[in-house]
Image (spheres, rainbow, N blue to C red):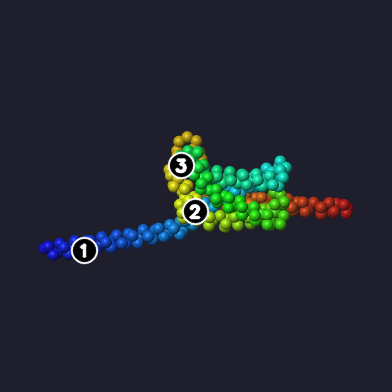
Amino acid sequence: MTSHDEHVHAGHQHAMHEGHEGHGDHSAHDAHGAHGGGVNAMAASATLHCLTGCAIGEIAGLMIGTAIGLSTGWTIALAVTLAFAFGYALSTLPLLKSGLAVGAAFSVVLAADTLSIATMELVDNLVMALIPGAMEAGLVNVVFWIGMMIALSVAFVAAFPVNRYLLQRGKGHALTHQYHGAEPVQEGVRRFIPSFSSGALAAVIIAFMLGGLSVAVADEMGGGSAPAEQVEMQGH
C-alpha cells in the first residue's frame, strides 16, 4: 500500500515538473515573439506617429512661411518647429485620453519622442537639400512634393531603428505604451479626444502627399497649356 502511494506521488511530482518545464518553454516562446514581431510593430507605429506629425508640421510651416514672405532659413526654422509641435501633440493625445495630466503627459512624450523626431527632421531636411531644386521649388511644384515623399520615406527608414533600439531598452515609446492600453476617460472634455490608429495615420500621410502632388501637377499642366493657346490665338 505504501509502495503504491509513493509510486503515485512520484508520478504526480514528475507530471508537475514536466508541466512546469512546458510552461517555462511557453513563456520563453512568448517572450521571443514579443521581442521580435512585437517590438518591430511598436517601433513601426511609433515611427509612423512621429512621421505624421513631422509631415503635417513641415508642410504647414512651409505654407505659412511662403504666405507671409519669410526667407528660406526662417521658413525652414518654422517648419521644423511645427514638426516638433505636431509630433509631440499626436503622441500626447492618447495619454491625455487615458487620464494623465497635461504636464505629466508632455513630460513623458518629451522623453519618448525627442530623439525620434530629431532624427527625422535631420534626415528629412538633409535629403531635401540634396535633391536639386527641392528646397526652392515652392509648394505648387512637382519637384517639391516628389522630393518631400522621398525625404519622408528615407526619414522613416532612419528613425525606425532608433525607435526599435529605444524600445528594446525600455525607453522611447516604451514610456508611453503602458498608457495606450488604459481605459479611456469617459467624463469631461477628455472623452472627446480622438484616437488615431496606425492605419489612419498612414492614410493621412498618403492623402496629404497625393493631394499636394495633384495640385502641383494640375498647376503645371494649366500653366503649360496657356502659352500654346496664346500662340494659337495670335496666329489667327
| Sequence-earlier tag: 1 or 3 | 1
| Residue 15, placed above or below residue 222 | below
Q: Amino acid at mark 1?
A: Gly
List the residue tagged with mark 3: 98
Circle 1 Cα neighbour tier, 10 Å, few/some/many (<14 / 14–19 / ≥20): few
- On the image, the x and y values in percent for residue 221 come to 74, 53
Name of the residue lying farthest toward the left: 1
Q: Which mark is residue 166?
A: 2
Q: Are marks 1 and 3 in contact (CB under 8 Å)?
A: no
Residue at the image point whose x is 72% and y is 52% from the top: 137
Q: Is label 2 in a helix, a strand or a loop?
A: helix
**Tag 1 secondary structure:** helix
Q: CA distance from mark 3 to mark 2?
A: 23 Å
Q: Nearer the viewer, residue 117 or 36?
A: 117
What number is the disc on residue 11? Answer: 1
Q: Residue flagged by tag 3: what amino acid is it?
A: Ser
Q: Residue at x 15, y 62 (%)?
A: 5
State the separation of the CA atoms marked 1 and 2: 47 Å
Q: Nearer the viewer, residue 49 or 224?
A: 49
Hey, what amino acid is under mark 2? Answer: Leu
Quadrant containing the N terminus is bottom left
Residue 187 horizontal side relative to residue 68, left or right? left
Instruction: Find residue 184 and report its horizontal and vertical position in percent.
Output: 45, 42
